[in-house]
Image (spheres, rainbow, N blue to C red):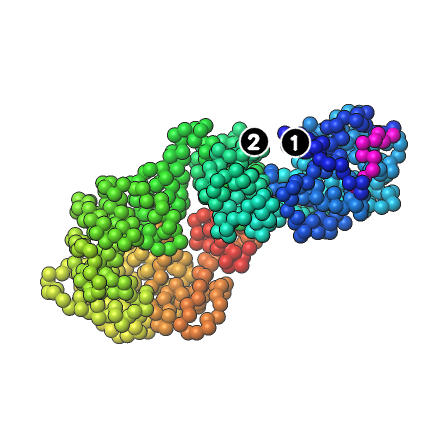
Amino acid sequence: MVAKSRASAALDSPAVPEEYGEGVDQPSGPGGSSRPHDPLFAARFLPPRLPRFLVRRERLLDRITAGSRSPLTLIVGPAGAGKTVLASQWATEQARRDKVVWLTIEPTDTSGTFWSYVLEALRRHPIPLPDDLVAPVSETADHAMVARLAAALADLSAPVTLVLDQFDAIKARREAADQMHFVLRHAAPRLRVVLTTRYDPPLPLHRYRAAGEISEIRNSDLVFDAPAASVLLNRHGLHPAPADLQALLERTAGWAAGLRLSALAMQRSDDPAAFIQQFATDRTSIADYLLTEVLDAQPEASRDLLLRVSVLARVTPDLANTLTGRDDAEWILASLERANAFVEPLGTTRWYRLHPLFAEVLRAHLRQRMPGVEPELHRRAAHWLAADGQCADAAEQAARAGDWAYAAEIIIDDLAIGSLLTGPAAPRLRGAFATMPTDLPGTAPALVTAALCLAGGDGDGCATALRRADVCLAEEGPTATRKTFCRAFLGTLCTAPTGDVLGAVATGGTAGGPPRPGPVPSLPGRTPEFRAVLGSRLEPACADTEQAAPTVARTAGSGRPAQRADGITARLAVAESAVCLARRDLSAAVAVLVGQPGGGAERDVALARALIAAGQRGRAVDILVRVPLAPLNPAMTRSQARLVRAQAAARRHGGDDARRLLCQALQQTRPQDIAPLCDADEDSPPPPARAVTRELSPRRACVEPSSARTPQPLLPALLEPLSGRECDVLRQAAQMQSNAEIATELHVSVNTVKSHLKSANRKLCVNRRRDAVRRARQLKLV
C-alpha cells in the first residue's frame, strides 16, 4: 500500500532534474529489463516528489552526506517518521554532484527480483556494467551473479551511492541482506548504500559499528522539535501559540506524520487551537494511518497485546502477561520495539510505553472490538501493581476500574494518604479519585474523601468525612491500626493552622490561629498522650527539638498516671528519650527510661540506644540480650533491635556480626517498605545503620560532606562479596535479557542463572532481580 502510493506520487511529480540522471526511461542494453516502459516499474527508480510543506532539516541532510562517504548509512524509524522524505530530498540534491541511484523496494520482491531491479537502476544512470551481467531469471539470485556485480562495482572510476527505500519491505529479507553485505564488503569503497527501513536490517551491524563504517539516523533524530514543528505548521498557514504548539508536540511526540495529519485537520477546523486540545484520534485520519500501517501489520498475538496494554501508561512483560493471560509478552514487546512499532523501552528498565497517539487510537479500537473489557483490564493491573508495591499506580488503575473501595484500601494500607495532598503523584491521584462517590461505605473511602476535601480547602467536607470514618473505626475495633493512623494524621492537619502541627497534635486540635470550619471529633479510644507521641515523633525529624521536648513534657506531666495505661506511659517515655537524643542531652535520654514500667521490647531497645550514645555499651548489650527477635514483636522493633546490636558490635569489635545484623535489619523491614533508621540528629552519635556503613563498608557511595550537618546517602555493606559469575549475570540482567538469554550468553544452564540471581539477591539484601541490578550499580559492581 505504501509502495503504491509512492509510485503514484512519483508518476504525478514534475520532471526529474537533468542533474539526477539522463535517460532514466531508456532500455539499458542486453542486461536491461524486458519491461522498460512500464510506468509503475519506472516509478521505482525515481525519488518521490518532495511535498510543498517540506521542512528542510539541514542537520540531518549533512549527516547523510557525511555518512555516505562510508559503506553504509541507515535511516531507521517507524511508519510516518519522514524517512523517505528525508532520503528523497538528499538524493535529489546530491545527484547534482555525485552518482546517486534510487530504488524503492516492493513487498513482493524476492532476492532475484531485488537484484534485477538493482541492475536496472544502475544501468539507467548509467553505471558501466558488463554486458553479459544479466538479471536473475528465478526468485533466488545466483551467488555468481552477485559476485560478478561486486567485482564490477569495485572497478568503477568514481563512487556510486545506491539508495534503497523501504528495505524492510523485501520478502526475502535475510537472503537479500546477506548478499548486500557481500557486495558491500567487496565493492567498497566504490559502492555506498543508504537504507531507509522501519527496523534494523539483518546485517552484521556490530561489525560496521566496530569498523566505523556506518552512519545511523534513528527515530530520536527524526522526531520534530518545536522549531521544526513550527515551520511545518507555518507551511500549512497555521501559527499556533507556543502553549498550543507544545501541547501538540506532547500529544504527537514529534511524530512527523502525526504533525502533518493534525495540520491538515486544523486547516479544516474553525478553531485550530481548540482542535489541538480536543481532537479525538479515533475519528481522524491519524487513526486510519496507525491502524493500517502499524496495528494491522502485526500478527494476531501482538495485536491483542497492544490493545490490552493500551490502558496503561507503561507496562512490563509480567504485567502484560497478566492482562493477556499469556506468557510470551517479553518476546512480543521486544519484537515490537525492534520493529519500531510505536513501542519504546523506558531507559534500561524492563518497562515499555506506547506512543501517546498510538495508545489513544488503540484504546478507542479496544472499546469497539472488545466492549466492556476495559474495566477488567484496569482491575487486573491494579492488583498486579499493588502486589509489586506501586501504590499510586495501583490506586489509579483501581479507580479507573470503578473499584473505589479497593482503590481507597490501597491508599490506606500503604499509609499513602499524604500522596493525595502533596508530592509528584498528588495531581494524578486526585484526578483519579475526582469522580468517587462521597457516600461510599467503609473507613477507607471516608478517609480518602476527607483527604480530597482537605486538599481542596473544604474543611466542612473533611470534618464530615472524618466523622463517618470515626463511626466505621468504632465498628472495626483496635485492629485497624493503619486506618487509625491515617485518621489521626488527617485530623491533625484538618484542625491545625499551618506551622503549628505539633500544637494541634498535642492539644487535640485547640491550637491558636485561624479557626477551621467545624470541629473535628477526637479519635475514638485515643488520648492526648497518643497525639503527643505522634507529634514528638514528627518534630525531631523536622529538627524542631526545642518545641518537641516541652510538648512531650507537658503531656507526660498532665493528668494522673493512674488514669494512663502503662503502654501509653512507656511510649511517651520512649518519645521523650528520642527528643533528648536529638538534642544530645544523653543523660536525660537514659534517665527518662530507667525504671520505666511497661513498654516491653520497644522501651528496652530505646534504652539500649540511649546507653550506647552515652558510651555505656556494656549495659546496652546486657539489655539487648533480653529483647526477643522472634515474630512476637513488631517488625520495626525487631529491626531496631538488630540495628542497635549492629552499632554496638561495630563500636566494640566490628567484623562479620555487625554486617550480619545490619543486613538482617534491612531484610526484616524491606517487605513492609519501612526505613529502619533510629532517631538522632546529625550532630549526635550516628544512628546504627549510618554508623555501621561508615565503620564497615569499603564500598559506601558517598560524597564528602561540605559541612558537619549535611547528611549524605550511604549504602549498606555487603553481607559477602559477589562472585565474578554473579556479577556477570547481573551485567546481562542489566541489559534486560531473560534468564534463557543470559544462559546462552554465559554458556550455562537456566537453573544456574537462577541460582546466581538468588545468591546475588541475598548478598545485596533485595528480593527482586531489578532491585539487585539497581543496588549493584549503586555499589559500582556492574
> In the image, residue 571 lies at what x, y percent?
22, 62
> In the image, residue 746 lies at what x, y percent?
60, 45
Please give the label number shown on residue 696.
none
Q: Is residue 67 left or right of residue 157?
A: left
Residue, x 27% and y 72% (percent of image)? Answer: 546
Q: Which residues are magenta?
A: 20-29
Front residue (pair 336, 38): 38
Q: Is residue 477 left or right of residue 167?
A: left
Residue, x 73% and y 36% (percent of image)? Answer: 14
For disc 1, the neighbor class at 10 Å (few under 14, some 14 to 19, many from 20) is few
Q: Is residue 495 left or right of residue 716?
A: left
Of marks 2 and 1, the one in the foreground: 1
Instruction: Residue type at mark 2: give it.
Output: Thr
> In the image, residue 446 lies at what x, y percent?
24, 46
Q: Can you say whether 154 is above or below 601 in the image?
A: above
Q: Secondary structure at mark 1?
A: helix
Q: Is residue 388 visible?
A: yes
Front residue (pair 80, 538): 80
Residue 278 figure quarter: top left
Q: Is residue 312 left or right of residue 398?
A: right
Instruction: Residue type at mark 1: give it.
Output: Ser
Residue 126 figure quarter: top right
Q: Label 1: which residue?
A: 5
For disc 2, the neighbor class at 10 Å (few under 14, some 14 to 19, many from 20) is few
Q: Label 2: which residue?
A: 292
Which image quadrant: the N terminus?
A: top right
> In the image, residue 409 lies at what x, y percent?
30, 44
